[in-house]
Image (tube, grey):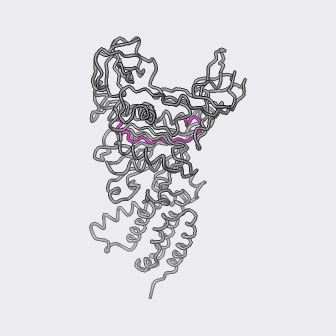
Amino acid sequence: MEGKIIGISGSVVTVSGLEDPKMNNIVFIGTNELVGEIVKIEGENAIIQVYEDTSGLRIGEKAVDSNEPLSVELGPGLIGSIFDGIQRPLDKILAKEGTFISSGVKVNSLDREKKWHFKPKVEEGKLVEPGEEIGEVKETSLIKHKVLVPANKKGIIKKIAEEGDYTIEENIALLEDDNKKTEEIKLMTRWPVRTARPVKEKLSPNIPLLTGQRVIDTMFPVAMGGTAAVPGPFGSGKTVIQHQLAKWSDADVIVYVGCGERGNEMTEILATFPELKDPKSGKPLMDRTILIANTSNMPVAAREASIYTGITLAEYYRDMGYSVAVMADSTSRWAEALRELSGRLEEMPGEEGYPAYLGRRVGEFYERAGRARILSGKIGAATIIGAVSPPGGDISEPVSQNTLRVTRVFWALDASLANARHFPSINWLNSYSLYTDGLDQWYRKNIAEDWPELRDKSLATLQKEAEINEIVQLVGYDALPEADKLILDVAKMLREDYLQQNAFDEIDTYASVNKQYKMLKIIAQVFDAEKAALDRNVPIERIQSIQVKPKIARLRYTSEEEIDAKLKEIEKDIEEIKKISVEK
């Protein structure tokens, strides 16, 4: 039944006359049928947040209730696509509308005409459970799209399509339930974005998500299916770090959500990602990437929906048994959208004007991450890495604090490091990872038995350096004991030659975990040899006369194939340090 607009306040519209309105239902507003969502019900009136520009909307125009919640289309064709916050394909809108997009434009999220080659995986008469794979489609060169039984359905396959080409709206199977009711299964399904997709059980986060960034993988790792927060002031490198993780992390699928960021940053992503190659396969990176662009000049209400759209798409691929990484950049802009909409709804404001339910919304979003045994019995994972943009870099503000309460990794970005061109600008003194202990066993088994000890020793050296630097401010470098000078030297190696990476260098932009271990191990060996020489009362000037540090500095630019040869040269220098004796 149609209703009528009786009030307009920015993106919030009041409608009367809807029959039995329900919270979160989608309503089409006005003659242009703008998309909106019911967020509040007052008596016979429904308060609707509109996901598009409401300019030109008038009192008295019609509103039609769809009787469905905000949902996304799930099926082959998602990978490689660029959507807005409510899953409208921006490339198709551009082709239809040109540069300037009018309000109310209607374009299907997934292509209805394209045919996909379907291969059945079950036979007729088989009893299937929810989430079970019944066929597959080769979606891209990297992703096989698994066609699953709907999450809330089970029964007997009465009919299954033969191998061949089908559109997403054609029937590929017929399912009969216990009550002899039949249901058609197509390549495409729909799912409400605010409802988490079910799993059998959540698993312990004991496998790392490898990123190729040494400061992350070594010092502050994130688990596959884990959650990480990246807070930092303007210009500290949040977006650049998320770009690196999207390019180099070992997740099977990447969902990048540009939530309220500047248009030029998203333009850079849209321009560069199609040109990039996946490091593991050499195929285009877009063959495993979904981009959701909702920039700061797009309607604010759609920004609030964009992260739910992103995590729902991630859960869909997780349910196929893939590891998915979601980059949310930035959740502060999403929280600002919540604040603006809450103000228009005249809700009681909480701290700094944010709604009182901010912490719950943040928690609900990050809770959808996890490594899980999915309905089919396989294992999939959805990792969430959320950037936070606190005003002035002050992480005591509500969004940062609520995020840190529910995430288990904190990469503290430092503007002074970014200004010094130290990338990644993650401050090793303020950051932490609560996954470290749980991941140690994996590192011991797959990399080296002494990995945790090397990491702890390196962090202790960097912390000791910070303490010594405070003394240097008072007495100067020359007044320091020889042992403290050695600490400063080794800490400088760790900072400049290990933790720092060059994102523009073809080799240094990514370091495998094996290379990381070899680099860290050789620095520790140099430290031990020099410390032993100091214990023999050898002056530090004599120790430093052996030019080992420049060779260590060049390791980061050394390829995986050549690094062992370079390490042998450094080991010879270490032997020279061990032979130094005190001159009489």
Q: Is 303 displayed left or right of 392 in the figure?
A: right
Q: Is residue 376 above or below residue 447?
A: above
Which quarter of the rendered picture does the C terminus lie within?
Answer: bottom left
Residue 397: x %, y % from top left: 30, 41
Q: Is 13 displayed left or right of 161 in the figure?
A: left
Magenta-span inclusion, residue 287: no
Residue 473: x %, y % from top left: 28, 66
Q: Is 584 displayed left or right of 58 in the figure?
A: right
Front residue of this view, candidates 283 and 92: 92
The answer to whether one can see residue 537 in this image is no
Q: Is residue 552 above or below residue 435?
A: below
Quadrant housing residue 490? bottom left
Residue under the point 62% across and 27% down: 149
Residue under the point 47% across and 61% down: 457
Residue 569: x %, y % from top left: 54, 74
Residue 176: x %, y % from top left: 66, 19
The residue range painted magenta reads 317-335
Which quarter of the rendered picture does the N terminus lie within?
Answer: top left
